[in-house]
Image (cartoon, helix red, strand yellow):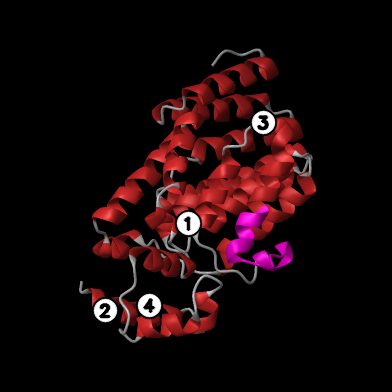
Amino acid sequence: MATHGFGEIIKGMREKADLSQTMLAGEYMDRGYLSKIERGIITPTKETLEYLFERLGYNPTFLADYLINDESARIQKMKNEINVHFRRERFAEAEKLLQQFKNDDQFMSKKFSSQYISLYEAALIVDPKRTSERLELLMEALKISIPVFRVEDLGKKYLLNKQEIRIINLIGVAYHDLDRLDDAIELMQQLMANYDRRFIDASFKGTHYPVVIYNLTKYLGMVGRYDEAIRICLIGEETCFDLGAFRMLPEIVFNRACCILERDGDKETFVRLMRECYYTFGLYRKFEDQEITKAYVKEKTNIDL
């Protein structure tokens, strides 16, 4: 596919979604710049393409990779390494790589970099006593791209890219850690509504939507809203199967099992579902989650998985 064809592709996607150039451009981009991209006057960078495709609800990889160069590949490799360090809770290694980014003039010159840095600096704050500081940093990061953010508009207004979605998810976690569960629930409900109201392709949705379902159902269970939590868990499980995105499936089933036990006292169903979670966690090498599942079942039922 030729690079000059991206403008026509973006214009077609935008018009199909019934979006104006101003709506698609958002805060990061001047409308005139987008117009020049659509007319083929300007060749977009890989980062610009990712931003536009994600706001349109598409996985950008299959198109944006046509523009990747050695510098983009280097940066993407570092981002991938940071993500791995965070997943495995190797925070010291993640912090070293983040510092390399902050000292990289070429990276910091890009539009999205300051928000990326703020996002991961907030994620590095793991001390519970600093949760308010983490929340403040996340809110400031979100304001970089959405200067006037209103939770009540989240479900009906914003076009979100994956970086913004990660920030909003982490804001929900911070609310949870501050025991602001009503705020966490409202935020996740609105984020779920954002997914449901607009087109998002299977790959993009499968990566992020199950995380929203997991967080929302966890918070609902904590405040005793079991019926609602179970209903949304079932939606999440069906979504995982429909999209072929199974990594968060055991976490969602775990939440449903806990709600069933608390609501109905149904130990048989609880143990059956937890056994499924236990073995699925093992398939994904989530051994710590396996042990948590085993201990929780023992505590609640005195049964060894």
Q: Is residue 24 above or below residue 76?
A: below
Count of numbered circles in the view: 4
Instruction: Kindly indicate the quadrant of the structure image that contains residue 49.
Output: bottom left
Residue receiving disc 4:
10
- The magenta-colored residue range is 139-154
Q: Are marks 2 and 1 in contact (CB under 8 Å)?
A: no
Residue 256 relative to residue 225: left or right? left
Mark 2, secondary structure of its residue: helix
Work out how far the residue at label 2 is from the one at label 4, CA to CA, in angstroms.
9 Å
Work out how far the residue at label 2 is from the one at label 1, CA to CA, in angstroms.
27 Å
- The image position of residue 19, as x and y in percent, is 51, 81
Foreground tag (3 vs 2)? 3
Q: Which numbered disc flags the more N-terminal residue, 3 or 2?
A: 2
Instruction: Kindly indicate the quadrant of the structure image that contains residue 253.
Output: top right
At label 1, the amino acid type is Ser
Q: Does residue 125 appear anywhere in the picture?
A: yes
Placement of the C terminus among the 4 image quadrants: top right
Instruction: Tell me, yes or no, whether the highlighted magenta stretch contains residue 3.
Output: no
Residue receiving disc 3:
127
At label 4, the amino acid type is Ile
- The image position of residue 199, as x and y in percent, is 49, 69
- The image position of residue 58, as x and y in percent, is 41, 65
Residue 130 relative to residue 108: left or right? right
Q: Are marks 4 and 1 in contact (CB under 8 Å)?
A: no
Q: Which one is nearer the viewer's eye here, 12 or 145? A: 145
Residue receiving disc 2:
5
Q: Which numbered disc flags the more N-terminal residue, 3 or 4?
A: 4
At label 3, the amino acid type is Asp
Residue receiving disc 1:
113
Foreground tag (1 vs 3)? 1
Q: Residue at x 47, y 22 (%)?
A: 287
Work out how far the residue at label 3 is from the one at label 2, CA to CA, in angstroms.
48 Å
